Amino acid sequence: MPGSVALVATTTLSMHARALHSLVVKKVVMAITGLLLIGFLLMHMFGNLKVFIGPEAYNHYAEWLKQDILYPILPHGWFIWIFRAVIAVSLVLHIYCATKLWQASLRGRGAHDNKKYTKVRRPQQTIAAKVMRWGGLTLLLLLIFHILMFTTQTITFGNFKAGATPYDMFTASFEHWYVWAIYVLFMAAVSLHVRHGFYSAFTTLGANVGPQARVFLNGLAYFAAALIFVGFMLPPTAVLFGLGVS
């Protein structure tokens, strides 16, 4: 009897180990972390829109984000570091799973290509799907750039000096057309990534159950991508052209 229990336990552990390395698990992890990152983008976007209310509201939001969320459940300043850790782990897992799935796709493609007698017809990919990996890399670079500008204040532009308020940092940065132009390229790549990733994530999680669901998810994916692009570009565009933000 003990031997049977040990055999069952060993078999179960082996099955779990194989499951953790399976492509299905990687797709699910990629879907969940992707949706979490999209949620982060939406939250950050709505925070940026406070720039239209004025310096006091924007600076208060930035201070609240760093100090007061979940206080007194958590001590002052703890939430932002927990949040950053969750986002960092999600990003690492997302990139890891994406890389492994891409490598598996290349191996599968190579196996098909070796069968010269078999004519493989691959479905046409959307532009968003083709630039998917580049969009992920762009998002990573954007996050690093953002941290260097607004968190560590390693990179500064124009009148933006270390120690400036969040509002002053934001407005001083986007007074320069080239910063705005770089931001447009970043957000275009990220939005394309979101369009494809949003649809793929819900498909992986089983929401794509038929033609109507497919149409709905596709429309929702386009809406999310457009919302993120427009929402992120409104504040810097207003700063650059002097439209209600000074």
Image (cartoon, grey):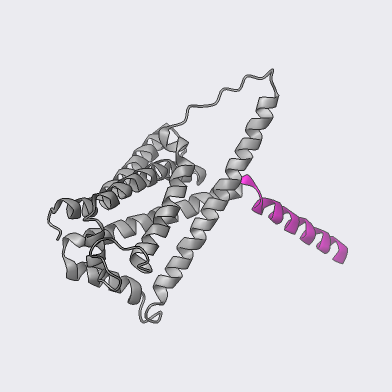
The answer to whether residue 190 is above or below residue 155 is above
- Coordinates of residue 138 in the picture (x, y in percent): 42, 48
Which span is picked out in magenta? 1-23
Can you say which quadrant of the picture contains the C terminus? bottom left
- Coordinates of residue 136 in the picture (x, y in percent): 46, 48
Quadrant assignment, res 1: bottom right
Is residue 6 on the magenta stretch?
yes
Choose between 8 and 122: the one closer to the eye: 122
Is residue 198 on the magenta stretch?
no
Residue at x 32% of width, y 48% of height: 182
Residue 220 is at least partly visible in this image: yes
Quadrant assignment, res 219: top left
Asked if residue 70 lies left or right of residue 28, the reply is: left
Residue at x 53% of width, y 57% of height: 92
- Coordinates of residue 230 in the picture (x, y in percent): 26, 47
Choose between 133 and 41: the one closer to the eye: 133
Residue at x 39% of width, y 40% of height: 217
Instruction: Name the chief secondary structure element in magenta.
Output: helix
Residue 1 is at least partly visible in this image: no
Asked if residue 44 lies left or right of residue 135, the reply is: left
The residue at the far front in this view is 158
State how many labels appear: 0
- Coordinates of residue 101 in the picture (x, y in percent): 59, 43
Choose between 26 and 3: the one closer to the eye: 26
